[in-house]
């Protein structure tokens, strides 16, 4: 896709969602859209390191939880989550560099398992620290609504804030695809030795990307916590969250600008909506369908939903051209 | 001399470790032969546990169920290889990671849907007695599970080391191309290794039901432990898995007692990070 068509799609999506957020007042639907946007951002953050750079992470909840806890703590103790939101992003970026510095020496599954181990350590720690509310987590106070407290009476306003972060993530990805760093990452994914031999500093490229991933996922975590007004270890740091983030990325299509958004849309439709329709959430139907979807996609369409959309577009274009030839 | 609770802890740690060994041997066998890290390994453990529970409901106790479950899991493993893994191996390297990960999500979802999230334990489990050896108390069930796992691990080792198909598996793990040139049917052997690996984790699931409960997410924790064990022992090594498993069992039980039960997994995960960063070939492995 050209930069122009990326921006056109982004413009259309953003306009449609703004209209929806302001004009449609069904709390259930708006909540789905909000969760979808948060997961689109998380999936995009995951896509940077695991898609473009090819370092598969199964512990991305680490950063999500970091942001959620940081803004929640500031909301409780200082009455505003904003500093916490920034602090969470900063801490997540530092954490990413700290974890990445040793772990990027690991290849393939060694790295993937290390990410699970680090996130598990974080979850166990949060479960045992008094200040973080241990296993129960903690609730946040209801503050006067407004942008200063990031609490809103209208569900639509949460959608707008999440949309803002989503637009930033999409613009960053469009820029990444065209930047030197983006080319470095793809070179590293395809063949790290070859990339290094032509002067790509693989570790620096991966660390920079991972720090940005951490910060972005933490921001998504902060927004999520602000909307839920609750944080708990399992809900923010648990393996199921890490799995959901990777699901969104894989199903949507790795190393594509729009893959994570498509994956998140399907995730929310299946997990939150489908689950509710097929007899309550948490009965496993969502996981069952999603697992089956991953299996179908990796076996037949490794480029994910974005790849499928791409081939449909191409065949449509061909059909338009055909009559004139 | 009085060692306090130490002897008890060491014995518990070793017995726990022996079960980890049987789980990990399955994982390491699959990895050694076809370079596949089976992220769904724990879910096969979970399936075997439910299978054992189901058999117990119709009056078959876990010891009698052991061969039945092992054979069924072998067939399932070989089938999963034929239908899924073989296809994934033809794709990019990440396909196997995502494929087995998809299988994890699918099986966990299926279990949650079919069996709900309730904890299930075998009704009227056998071996309820306790043996007293000096200051050490041993649950009979724990002993049977531990030694059963040790016996089966030894059997797998003997199979890989001393039989014709075992030699073929080792040949494949050493040099895939050369082994095929010597007339080894790789697809057949891969299916055998995957079936055998799943049969191991299946047998471990049955033995585990003597002392533990089945629930949809039971596999995750054990699979993580198995990853640590296999990293310690060196990916692909059966003896390494046994040594690593006993070490992890000890670390878990001693850490749980001397630090805090809630934190017992932290030293295990730190051990993983330490080993892969400092000695990526594993404690016993050679480069």
Image (cartoon, grey):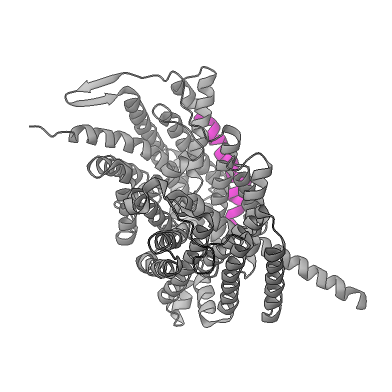
The answer to whether any part of residue B91 appears in the image is no
The stretch drawn in magenta includes residue B87: yes
Instruction: Please identify the quadrant where the N terminus of chain B is shown.
Output: top left
Residue drawn 63% across and 54% down?
A: A268
| Residue B12 visible in image | yes
| Quarter placement of the C terminus of chain B | bottom left
In percent of the image, x 66 and y 39: which residue is there?
A: A279
Q: Which residues are magenta?
A: B68-90
Relative to residue B3, is residue A4 depicted above or below?
A: below
Question: Which percent across, then down, holds residue A208?
Answer: 44, 75
How many marks are shown on the rendered structure?
0
Q: Position of residue A169 (x, y in %)?
A: 56, 71
Majority secondary structure of the magenta segment?
A: helix
- Residue B275, quarter of the rendered image: bottom left
Q: How far across and how far down the image is residue B172, in percent?
A: 47, 51
Question: B223 left or right of B194?
Answer: left
On whether residue B190 falls in the magenta region, the answer is no
The quarter of the displayed image where residue A252 is located:
bottom right
Quick one: which residue is furthest to the front in this view?
A144
Q: B117 or A19: nearer the eye?
A: A19
- Residue B203 sits in which quadrant? top left
Residue B24: x, y in percent?
Answer: 40, 43
Query: In the current view of this chain or complex, which residue is farthest to the left?
Result: B1
Depth check: B36 or A6 in front? A6
Q: Residue at x 51, y 17 (%)?
A: B59
């Amino acid at each position: 896709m050209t930069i122009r068509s990326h921006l056109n799609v982004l413009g259309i999506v953003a306009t449609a969602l703004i209209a929806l957020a302001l004009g449609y007042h069904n709390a259930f639907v708006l909540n789905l859209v909000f969760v979808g946007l948060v997961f689109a951002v998380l999936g995009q953050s995951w896509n940077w390191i695991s898609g473009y750079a090819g370092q598969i992470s199964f512990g991305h909840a680490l950063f999500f939880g970091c942001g959620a806890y940081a803004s929640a703590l500031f909301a409780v103790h200082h009455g505003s989550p904003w500093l916490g939101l920034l602090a969470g992003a900063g801490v997540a970026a530092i954490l990413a560099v700290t974890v990445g510095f040793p772990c990027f020496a690991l290849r393939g599954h060694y790295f993937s398992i290390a990410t699970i181990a680090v996130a598990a350590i974080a979850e166990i720690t949060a479960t045992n620290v008094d200040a973080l509310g241990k296993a129960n987590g903690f609730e946040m106070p209801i503050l006067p609504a407004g942008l200063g407290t990031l609490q809103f009476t209208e569900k639509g306003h949460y959608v707008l804030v999440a949309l803002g972060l989503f637009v930033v993530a999409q613009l960053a990805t469009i820029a990444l695809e065209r930047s030197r760093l983006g080319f470095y990452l793809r070179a590293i994914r395809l063949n790290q030795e070859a990339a290094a031999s032509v002067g790509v500093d693989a570790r620096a490229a991966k660390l920079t990307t991972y720090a940005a991933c951490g910060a972005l996922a933490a921001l998504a975590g902060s927004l999520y916590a602000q909307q839920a007004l609750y944080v708990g270890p399992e809900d923010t740091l648990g393996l199921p969250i890490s799995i959901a983030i990777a699901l969104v990325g894989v199903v949507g299509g790795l190393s594509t600008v729009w893959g994570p958004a498509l994956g998140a849309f399907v995730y929310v439709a299946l997990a939150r909506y489908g689950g509710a329709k097929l007899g309550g959430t948490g009965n496993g139907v969502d996981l069952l369908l999603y697992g089956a979807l991953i299996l179908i996609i990796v076996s037949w369409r490794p480029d994910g939903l974005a790849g499928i959309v791409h081939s449909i577009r191409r065949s449509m274009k061909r059909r338009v051209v055909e009559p004139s030839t | 001399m009085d060692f306090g609770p130490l002897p008890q802890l060491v014995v518990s740690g070793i017995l726990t470790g022996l079960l980890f060994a049987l789980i990990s041997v399955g994982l390491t066998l699959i990895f050694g032969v076809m370079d596949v890290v089976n992220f769904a390994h724990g879910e096969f453990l979970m399936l075997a546990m439910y299978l054992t529970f189901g058999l117990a409901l119709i009056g078959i106790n876990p010891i009698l169920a052991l061969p039945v479950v092992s054979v069924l899991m072998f067939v399932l493993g070989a089938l999963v290889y034929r239908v899924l893994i073989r296809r994934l191996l033809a794709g990019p390297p990440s396909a196997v990671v995502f494929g087995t990960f998809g299988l994890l999500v699918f099986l966990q979802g299926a279990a949650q849907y079919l069996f709900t999230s309730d904890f299930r334990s075998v009704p009227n489990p056998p071996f309820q007695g306790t043996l007293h050896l000096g200051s050490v108390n041993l649950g009979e069930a724990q002993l049977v599970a531990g030694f059963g796992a040790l016996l089966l691990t030894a059997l797998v080792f003997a199979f890989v080391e001393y039989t014709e198909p075992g030699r073929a598996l080792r040949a494949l793990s050493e040099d895939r191309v050369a082994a095929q040139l010597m007339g080894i049917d790789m697809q057949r052997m891969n299916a055998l290794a995957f079936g055998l690996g799943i049969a191991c984790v299946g047998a471990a699931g049955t033995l585990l039901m003597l002392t533990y409960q089945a629930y949809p997410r039971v596999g995750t924790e054990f699979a993580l432990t198995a990853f640590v064990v296999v990293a310690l022992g060196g990916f692909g090594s059966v003896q390494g898995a046994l040594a690593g498993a006993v070490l992890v069992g000890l670390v878990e039980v001693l850490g749980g007692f001397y630090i805090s039960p809630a934190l017992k997994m932290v030293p295990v995960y730190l051990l993983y990070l330490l080993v892969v960063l400092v000695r990526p070939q594993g404690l016993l492995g050679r480069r």
